[in-house]
Image: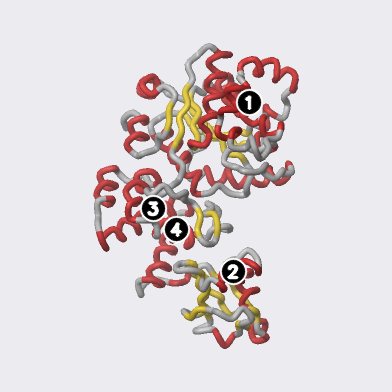
Amino acid sequence: MGNVYDVWHERGLIQQITHEEPLRQLLATEVVTAYVGYDATADSLHVGHLVTIMALAHLQRAGHRPIAVVGGGTSMVGDPSGKTEMRPMLTPEEIEANKRVIRSQLGRFLDFGEGRAMMVDNAEWLLRLNYVEFLREVGPHLSVNRMLTAEAYRSRWERGLTFLEFNYMPMQAYDFLTLNRRFGCRLQMGGDDQWSNILAGVDLVRRLERQEAYGLTTPLLATASGKKMGKTEAGAVWLSAEKTSPFEFYQFWRNIEDADVGRFLAIFTFLPMDEVRRLGGLRDRKINQAKEILAHEVTRLVHGAEEADRARSAAQALFGGQGDAGAVPSTELPHQELSAGVTVLELMVRTGLAASKSEARRTIQQGGLYLNGERVDDMQLEVTADHARDGIIELRKGKKGYHHVRVC
């Protein structure tokens, strides 16, 4: 494989970079250690994280060494980037549980075998820091004036920025410094909302270690029209099968806009670029073939080949009259319970089509719920076993949010 920098560039994985040509030359001549941080603020990564994960995977395929930092330490503070309010404070136990899930998800893309990629937790060094010593070492090299120009801080200035959050950028910069000292890490990568944090780390390494360090950001997940992407009617699109089923995950990619097909094939798959360009150039109804390949490839990477095949078969059964509908998200309810009747509002909550009864009411008021293909207008509707067809009650939220209630 050629220079991984050229691979990133061709696949649209570069948004901003600190020193383009020197970094490209470094990647061509040396084995480079680079890192991306993933805070453990949720019990799963989501599709937005896939961009940086793919960048790390290409780095490893090119013979370099990726480091995935699971932020057990920074998660105790919370990144203010992109947030209008302070993040909820998590307990150490919640953070530890989230870290285990994230490690497992990253393992689908990176080889953490002996001498390969590394996974570290910044709690190892951040939680042991002496605060005064930290201030004396790092503080003189971080400009408060420059920090306040960062979008993450500037956008929160009027609403209120806590001192806790103000410490996030110095902590992330210290991560880069620590990884540089311990493992010779020269490159920090992240989503474009991390640009200011990355710049702080690059500058700190250069000042304290007197060596070249680099920063690179990947694009944030957005459509060709500029609309922020990563959510469906059911909420965020997670990499966890428990939070977003493989079928729902498949459908998310199957339903993207035509203009995004080629770009997303380049970013989110390992297909050769000649094939990406061919598929991205399809038009009219033929573009659906490219969307199906995209959906299957990304689902295969995240959930495995078997689940990707099942999701594709379920989609074909629902929308194409062929395939197997067995992979459609489903919930089993006893015949006895359904014989007594379950309100449609309660059923939406139990199946995950709504987070609460109030959300379920809004969906029905907006004409977004269908029972066996018929729109539901009555919020007091009692769903019973009589609604089952061959043992299945079909619920649909919006155009594509299918869920089967199986009578057992």
Of the numbered discs 2 and 1, the one sitting upstream in the chain is: 1
Q: Position of residue 342 (x, y in %)?
A: 65, 80
Which disc number belongs to residue 91? none
Residue beneath disc 2: 362
Of the numbered discs 4 and 1, the one sitting upstream in the chain is: 1
Residue at image position (61%, 33%) is 153
Secondary structure state at the residue bearing disc 2: helix
Which disc number belongs to residue 252? 4
Residue beneath disc 1: 170
Q: What amino acid type is highlighted by mark number 1?
A: Pro
In the image shown, does 118 or 382 lie closer to the viewer?
382
User: From the viewer's perspective, is 247 left or right of 405?
Assistant: left
In the image shown, does 82 or 326 lie closer to the viewer?
82
Give above or below for 63 relative to 404. Answer: above
Secondary structure state at the residue bearing disc 1: helix
Residue beneath disc 3: 297
In the image shown, does 17 or 67 lie closer to the viewer?
17
